[in-house]
Image: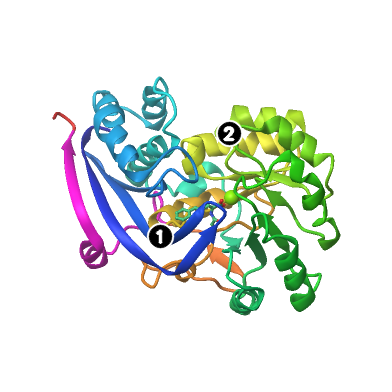
């Protein structure tokens, strides 16, 4: 394929409600969408970086900058590339996984569209729908949390994830168990808010039979997670720490995690995501697909990944209306606790032009021979 140019598109979507985690409160999703134009097809992707570097070191403006000034010029200079050549060309630059993932995915979408092949089939997807969980933010009060959880259970979500932080952990978990029973698949996510010194506090979650505790400690503390895992009964799952298949293999070998959350943006794309999946599967470690408040563009690709056989736990692959009043694509919906895996070529979906136009705040066209 011959790359002709790349369109960067910024947009802003209000969230249906404030989403609070241990790193802050979000009320809008600042979006960066990519549209890669080739001689054969166009490809779409969504960069999952946030407005500020509070989840990982990346953020939207930095991702746009490194795409424009570093990554795109490198791949635009390739002659007749395939997705592996694109991926390899970006490897000499350190970090910036979310920016790399976005560019690789836009290219992969274009390539797969030109081959009339769906991303799910390309990756080795085995099912046509995936069980869907929901991530529930930190609330001002327990009654408010119980209302929110009740609403999601009514919608059919098959697994509840509670965001936790010091001061909001045992009490909300106990309240959810008391109200909704022991059969609700329940897990928690601390987004790095604890230290190993909190092991005794986190062990108080043991009686509640949680599926997992996600990323209790800072991302660079694999050894700490291994030590913590020996002091609590709840299985430790890593999110922020897992930046590559190599790190996943190391974390598993160290005993730092028993379960892995895979987010394509965090590991640099769908090719590396499949490698993380394969490493985990080889070790018998269950994986599930995380979420970064993606619109339909990012959600579609995540659903393709989540259809692989190692994804044995429900993901944060919720319906569009979990986060947005109006998605930029046809909305994804939840049916009997599941969301459908797109079947069309590539990621299987594109933004609705009128909606996209309305929400766009800025665009930039980068010609390949610029
Ligand atoms: C997690 N996501 O698993 C993240 C982190 C997260 C669904 O819990 C704006 C954009 C706000 C991305 C808040 C879920 C966000 C965000 C949290 C990602 O750790
Ligand atoms: Mg997480």
How many other residues sit within 10 Å of disc 2, few (<14), some (14-19) or many (≥20)?
A: some
The answer to which image quadrant residue 61 occupies is top left
Rendered-image quadrant of the N terminus: top left
Asked whether the viewer can see residue 326, the reply is yes
Q: CA distance from mark 1 to mark 2?
A: 24 Å
Above or below 49: residue 360: below
The numbered mark, 1 or 2, whose residue comes first in the sequence reads 2
Magenta residues? 344-367
Q: Horizontally, is 40 left or right of 272 in the view?
A: left
Above or below 313: residue 65: above
Q: Residue furthest top?
A: 92
**Which dot marks residue 255?**
none
**Residue named by callout 2:** 275
How many other residues sit within 10 Å of disc 1, few (<14), some (14-19) or many (≥20)?
A: many
**Which dot marks residue 296?**
1
Which residue occupies the foreground of this view, 106 or 93? 93
């Amino acid at each position: 394929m011959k790359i002709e140019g790349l369109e960067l598109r910024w947009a802003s979507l209000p969230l249906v409600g404030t989403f609070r985690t241990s790193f802050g409160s979000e009320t809008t999703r600042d979006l960066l969408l990519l549209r890669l134009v080739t001689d054969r097809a166009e490809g779409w992707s969504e960069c999952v970086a946030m407005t500020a570097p509070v989840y990982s070191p990346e953020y939207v403006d930095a991702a746009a900058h490194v795409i424009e000034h570093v990554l795109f010029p490198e791949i635009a200079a390739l002659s007749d590339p395939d997705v592996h050549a694109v991926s390899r060309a970006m490897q000499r630059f350190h970090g910036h996984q979310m920016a790399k993932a976005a560019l690789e995915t836009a290219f992969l979408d274009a390539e797969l569209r030109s081959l009339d092949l769906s991303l799910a089939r390309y990756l080795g997807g085995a099912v046509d729908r995936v069980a869907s969980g929901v991530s529930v933010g930190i609330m001002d009060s327990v009654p408010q949390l119980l209302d929110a959880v009740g609403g999601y259970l009514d919608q059919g979500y098959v697994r509840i994830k509670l965001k936790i932080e010091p001061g909001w952990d045992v009490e909300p978990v106990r309240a959810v168990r008391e109200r909704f029973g022991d059969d609700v698949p329940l897990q928690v996510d601390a987004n790095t808010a604890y230290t190993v010194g909190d092991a005794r506090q986190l062990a108080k979650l043991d009686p509640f039979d949680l599926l997992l505790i996600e990323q209790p400690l800072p991302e660079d503390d694999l050894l700490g997670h291994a030590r913590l895992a020996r002091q609590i009964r709840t299985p430790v799952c890593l999110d922020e720490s897992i930046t590559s298949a190599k790190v996943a293999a190391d974390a598993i070998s160290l005993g730092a995690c028993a379960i892995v959350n895979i987010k394509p943006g965090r590991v640099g794309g769908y090719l590396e995501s499949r490698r993380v999946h394969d490493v985990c599967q080889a070790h018998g470690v269950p994986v599930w697909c995380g979420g970064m408040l993606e619109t339909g563009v990012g959600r579609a690709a995540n659903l393709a990944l989540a259809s692989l056989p190692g994804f044995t736990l429900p993901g944060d692959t919720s319906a569009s209306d979990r986060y947005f009043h109006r998605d930029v694509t046809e909305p994804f919906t939840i049916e009997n606790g599941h969301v459908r895996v797109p079947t069309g070529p590539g990621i299987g979906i594109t933004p609705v032009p009128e909606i996209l136009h309305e929400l766009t705040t800025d665009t930039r066209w980068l010609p390949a021979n610029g």
